Amino acid sequence: MADNINLEIVTPKQVAYSKAVDSVVVSGIEGDMEIFKDHISLITFLKPGKIIAKSGNDSDTFFSTGGIVEFSNNKLSILLDNFFDSTTFQSEELLKLKQNAEKKLNNKEISDEEIYLNNQIIEQINNLKS
Amino acid sequence: MASLKFLRNRISSVKSTQKITKAMKMVAAAKLRKAQQNAENARPYSEKLNSIISNLKNSVTDMDSAPKLLVGNQKNETHLCVVLSSDRGLCGGFNTNICRKAKVFFEKILNERKTLKVIVVGSKANDQLKRKYNQYIIDKISLKDEKVISFGKAQEITDKILNLFARNEFDICTLFYNQFKSVISQIPQAQQLIPVSIEQKSNQQSLASNSEYEYEPDENEILENLLPKNIATQIYAAFLENQASEQGSRMTAMDNATRNAGDLIAKLTINYNRTRQAVITKELIEIISGAESL
């Protein structure tokens, strides 16, 4: 289809997702955004949150605690630190990430940015669970 | 000639050695497949990251304000070498090859009267390097408690390196590991981590696609976050390559050992049979000559 962008999600472990989609919603570090075809070339960071790939009426939802997005020539590459799809939203690993974040928050010496990011992780994971 | 009992014992001991090497070969083959898969799966990520960074590097015009990790601190005095090896032996020339490559590099640096610092990962590199370069080794990292190398371990090493860099303890960082080419050939590699060296071939491609990127936040801030991540990724990728190489190397070594054991058993068996025959002949001669003399 003409309106497609090629989405590729890669993690250090594998190519997690590769498909042509209509649009992708990501939570960038400076705000959420939805990327459509012919978006200007872009590089940005992700904060903890959902990634939603929409094609037609279908959509796939993923979660990650951070990564980088690169978009150029209608090719969207998302490099993620970790990757969870809807089947693993309840997994142990996510729980561990949350506990990790909570532990880090208890440490008084971390920067404001880290406090923010860790709070985000907890909030977003709580959102997923409900 | 050796006694029959001695030969019998020898044959059975070589046979049991052969069983062990055969088992090790099978285990290495199974692990190799997995390690190879892991290494291949990790490749797209590091390639993507590399291309993003090379794109960014091209767009950085003001070299003075660029992050230190990208351009280095303009000196070439102190070298930090990170040598990745395995924790287990019996894998042919795997560890020796890395160490040989590293030693050549060390000698070059020392000849140029520069300062050398070494971090060894895995006990085998430590064993081989400590005799001659013990005073240069500043850190040892063991992999004993890690069954599968996780990204966390790579991150841990990265943090150590970055800490040292932040304290101006070194100028140039080089990583030594074995690149997995095939089961029988692994190539020891020396890769410069800091300042970042981007392969030339990816440059060409990026020049073509170097359309104006929109950066959010700005380039330098992205680079500053991206570069440490890049180092961790590269170390992780090197770990995976190394692991595949180790298993490949072990498989070949054990295959050779099994074959050698087979040859040895054949030789010993011939020897054993001849000795046995000789003993029988001797006894017969004794009996016959005894009977004749009556």
Image: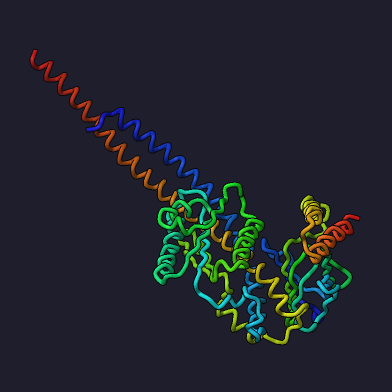
Farthest residue in the left direction? B293
Coordinates of residue B181 in the picture (x, y in percent): 50, 64
Question: Would you place residue B205 above or below residue A128 in this image?
Answer: below
Residue in view at x 15 percent, y 23 percent: B285
Q: Is residue A48 visible?
A: no
Residue in view at x 66 percent, y 81 percent: B65
Farthest residue in the right direction? A130
Q: Nearer the viewer, residue B82 or A9?
A: B82
Coordinates of residue B49 in the picture (x, y in percent): 66, 72
Is the image coloured rainbow, by chain, by secondary structure, or in one colour? rainbow
Q: Nearer the viewer, residue A50 or B136?
A: B136
Coordinates of residue A93 in the picture (x, y in percent): 77, 52
Image-based side of B285 in relation to A64, left or right: left
Image-based side of B272 in relation to A115, left or right: left
Image-based side of A74 in relation to A126, left or right: left
Q: Quadrant of residue B169?
A: bottom right
Residue in view at x 70 percent, y 78 percent: B220
| Quadrant holding the N terminus of chain A | bottom right
Residue in view at x 60 percent, y 78 percent: B71
Question: Would you place residue B246 above or below residue B292 in this image?
Answer: below
Question: Would you place residue B142 above or below residue B12 in this image?
Answer: below
Coordinates of residue A48 in the picture (x, y in percent): 81, 64
Q: Nearer the viewer, residue B216 or B278?
A: B216
